[in-house]
Image (cartoon, coloured by chain):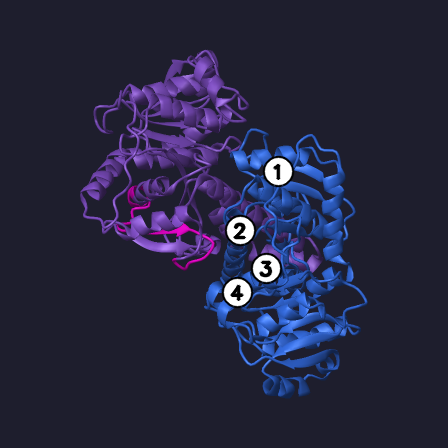
Chain colours: A blue, B purple
Amino acid sequence: MAAPAEGSLRRFSLAIDAMGGDHAPDSVLDGLELAAERHPQAQFLLFGDEARLRDALARRPRAAKICVLRHAPDAIPGDMKPTQALRQGRKSSMRMAIDAVASGEASGVVSAGNTGALMALAKIVIKTMPEISRPALAAIAPSLRGDVVMLDLGANVQCDARNLVEFTIMGDAFARAVLGLPSPTIGLLNVGSEELKGDDRVREAAEVLRGHAGLNFHGFVEGHDISAGTVDVVVTDGFTGNVALKTGEGVYKLMRELLKQVFTSSIPARMGYLLARPALERLREWMDPRRYNGAILLGLNGVVVKSHGGTDATGFAHAVDVAMDMVTHGFTQTIRESLSQLAAASSPVAIPPIVAQQD
Amino acid sequence: MAAPAEGSLRRFSLAIDAMGGDHAPDSVLDGLELAAERHPQAQFLLFGDEARLRDALARRPRAAKICVLRHAPDAIPGDMKPTQALRQGRKSSMRMAIDAVASGEASGVVSAGNTGALMALAKIVIKTMPEISRPALAAIAPSLRGDVVMLDLGANVQCDARNLVEFTIMGDAFARAVLGLPSPTIGLLNVGSEELKGDDRVREAAEVLRGHAGLNFHGFVEGHDISAGTVDVVVTDGFTGNVALKTGEGVYKLMRELLKQVFTSSIPARMGYLLARPALERLREWMDPRRYNGAILLGLNGVVVKSHGGTDATGFAHAVDVAMDMVTHGFTQTIRESLSQLAAASSPVAIPPIVAQQD
């Protein structure tokens, strides 16, 4: 059962898993309280323990205004394996929120719960688009030249050339819909920028991409190009993407820690911090990982956004922003159109056929 | 022809490719001028254009004291393909410096030239140790808990489980010899720390490593563990390692650029910078990429160090430090001993046999 396109037919903009994440449901509801200010026209369908959520919503009047409660007796624990979640999670808040997208009641779902379970359930229930062989996890990262879209971040640890080509098409559609770029530049992550670098997989994918007139394909990029903002979209396999994202986050944390040591190392340094504080605060806000919270599972018949499990209200509200952006820009429809345009475009190298999808 | 072990038999500590790198030979000779202060007992065999080097050495009395010149009529350009370098580069400064290690005249070689050519020439001329199927490129990176060894950084873009096991053994020996750690902790880079994460390749390698009593194997680590210093040695394939290293460097550059903007954003911020300057300078020195210059090709019958092509005298001198550390600690011998100990150790999972090496 494929979900219908986003639009006026759906009663709810988003289905929310209220029980997912380290501090659920409080962090989720606090996040919705913030989201309600930014999206006063939205309608959220909230899944979780009804009694608990009713009390919690009573203390959050803005969130209460845009949320409709629906009882889900179970919750999926953070350490449950995806296969187990598929078998045992039918009455869980996560599964029921995903069901609401599949049934057409909501256009998208946001959860801060178990990533593996969310990816598996979303694939099985909402289903992959017929043109796509494997969905990919994408996120937005900061760079010297503005926001950069990165994918895949771990949905597929092993990828072939075809997967990389599909990720590119999805990343392109995402950058157009969510970042508002008319013709985003796209780079394929590699160990060097020369055409002969890398393994067969990336070279084959690059050959296909060079032949597509509809894409603004820049060619190969290297690890340092992510933060440099050399391209708007960085495409790679899920293993490399996951490691690159976390390595970058690690260096940012290291720098933050070392700067803290610098500014507490002497009395003049402390005074220096106080003088530069407004500008340093702006830098911290701009680099704030919460501002980049919300990884998107691309390639499904509906919008699926994963919030970081440990985030707070600010972070969760950002994940809701990302999902609302995708829903209001008819993102799923944009990807479909891109896929059919690319299929129709003349191309010197055909995209290899994919295995038929069950629907 | 395998080179003899390091030691008193060799006349020269290091053979130096004076013509490799963006600013050669000046940056190389300025680097040697610095290195001469730190290693006054060393003897370097310097390869390159004799007339040019003689004049250049005349202006650098300390370097002149520890260097012996040898004429090399050619130099390998930065964009020459490895296969071409193998065929045409016989009289190049890089090749002749490598030849000096193979013949036993020098214990190691340092070059800031073409990386692909250096790796190919070193493998063919100095040869891989019989116990190792593929050499790996390693480097030292900063972390919250001190220096971390990372490998492979791009010598092998495609790796199997056996390669990862060998990289681990070489990384362990390197951390003991160069960082002076008696029992370095080792992590295998993956998309999660749980045993079931990742692809077959990393899971198989982890199973072998868990069975080795001689290694302090920590298990899987993630991207953010590199800068956190969770382990002393981070092992991965050449594709992921190359991307991770460059991604980390990119985020460091981004932060440096943003901090520059912060400290020039207002008059109080400028004053703040001046007050915190000594501590900020210490941070910059500590994170200085030149301090981490010198990637090491591990697994050969001799010490091979690649300096960054764009580095200056300070960076080149650091690459010489790394090579001198390896030479004086009898690094090649340490790896040999580790390999035979591991082969002799009882292990529940045998290392799969390797294809016999040509020697």
What is the spatial separation of the Cα atoms under label 4 and label 3, in whole angstroms? 10 Å
- Residue farthest to the right, as pictured: A8
Which residue was labeled with disc 3? A123
- How many angstroms separate mark 2 from mark 3 (CA)? 13 Å
**What residue is shown at x 78% (from left), y 74% (from top)?**
A40
User: Residue A352, how many percent across, how many down?
Assistant: 62, 38
Residue drawn 58% across the image and 34% down it: A204
Label 4: which secondary element: helix
SS assignment at label 1: loop
Left or right position of B109 against B1: right
Classify B93 as above or below B346: above
Dot 1 amino acid type:
Pro
- From the image, tell me which residue sits under label 1: A352
The three-letter code of the residue at mark 2 reads: Asn
**On the image, numbered disc 2 is attached to which residue?**
A156
Q: Which residue is under mark 4?
A: A117
B345 horizontally vs A102: left or right: left
Tell me how far mark 4 sits from mark 2, CA to CA: 14 Å
